[in-house]
Amino acid sequence: MADMTTITALILAGGRGSRMGGVDKGLQTLHGQPLALHALHKLRAQPGISAIAISANRHVDDYRQFGVPVWPDAVADYAGPLAGFLAGLTHCTTPLLLTVPCDTPAFPHDLAERLAAALLHANADIAMARAPDPDEPPGSPLRNQPAFCLLRAHLAADLAAFMAEGGRKIGAWAARQHTVHVDFNQPGDDRHAFRNLNTLPDLHALNTLHAP
C-alpha cells in the first residue's frame, strides 16, 4: 500500500473554456454546485491525500471561497494543462502531485490509490490513467487520460525547461519521463468515469438526466 499522505491533489481549472464559449468551466454548475467543487469533494473522500489546491487563472477569489489554495499559471497566455502541472509542482510541498481536470466529475473514487500503487511498484516518475472511450464499442483500445496524472515533484525543473522550449502537450512531455500507464477497465470500473464535459450542452444534458 502506498503512503497516500505524500500526495497533493490539484484541480485543473485554468483553461480558457473555449469549447464552452469562453466561460470559466470550473465555476459552471452541476446539480447546483460548481464543477470544481464536485472534484474537490471527491478528492477529499480519497484516503490520505494531505492537501488539495486549484489551478485557476480567472475568478481567483471565487475559487478561494472553496477553502483551498489557488495557484495561477506562471506561464502566460493560457498555456494549457501543463502550465497547471508546473504551478502545482512548483508550489506543492509533498513528494507527489495528483492532477485532475475540473470537467470530469465521475472520476474514480480510488484514482489516487491506484495511480500511487502503480507509480511506486514501477519506481516511475509519472503514473497516467488509461480508460475506455465511452463512445466506442466495448473492447476498443483504451485511451490515455493525460490530465489524470500522478507526478513526482522533482519533475518541476524538467517541465519548466520543456515549456520554455515551447512544449505544450502532456503526452510529449510524459514520453520523456519514466511513465507507467494504469488501466481503469477492471471489473467494477465505470467505463464512463473519465467522460469530460466539453460543452455547455454536455453539462445541460447531464443536469437534465439527473434532475429530480
Image (cartoon, rainbow, N blue to C red):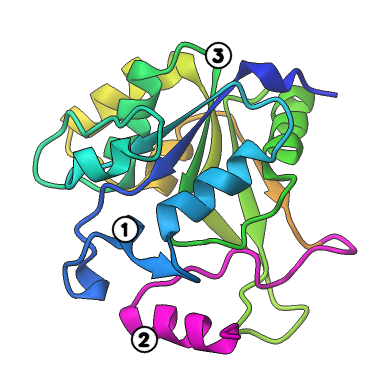
Q: Are marks 2 and 1 in contact (CB under 8 Å)?
A: no
In the image, what residue occupies the spot 39% across and 40% down?
66
Magenta segment includes 49: no
Q: Are marks 2 and 3 in contact (CB under 8 Å)?
A: no
- Marks 2/1: CA distance? 15 Å
Marks 2 and 3, the one that precedes in the sequence: 3
- Marks 2/3: CA distance? 39 Å
Where disc 3 sits, the SS reads loop
Q: Which stretch did the figure color magenta? A: 186-212
On residue 95, the disc is 3
Question: Of 170 and 72, which appears nearest the observer?
Answer: 72
In the image, what residue occupies the spot 32% across and 79% down?
200
Q: Amino acid at mark 3?
A: Pro
- Marks 1/3: CA distance? 29 Å
Indicate the position of residue 5 as horizontal and vertical percent values. 67, 18
Question: Of 70 and 15, which appears nearest the observer?
Answer: 70
Q: Residue furthest right?
A: 187
Q: Nearer the viewer, mark 1 or mark 3?
A: 1
Indicate the position of residue 195 as horizontal and vertical percent values. 55, 70
Marks 1 and 3, the one that precedes in the sequence: 1
Q: Residues within 10 Å of mark 2 (few under 14, many from 20)?
A: few
Q: Residue furthest front?
A: 212
Q: Residues within 10 Å of mark 3 (few under 14, many from 20)?
A: some
Establish if 20 lies above or below 209.
Answer: above
Question: What residue is pinned by disc 1?
Answer: 27
Magenta highlight: main SS:
loop
Question: What residue is pinned by disc 2?
Answer: 201
Marks 2 and 1, the one that precedes in the sequence: 1
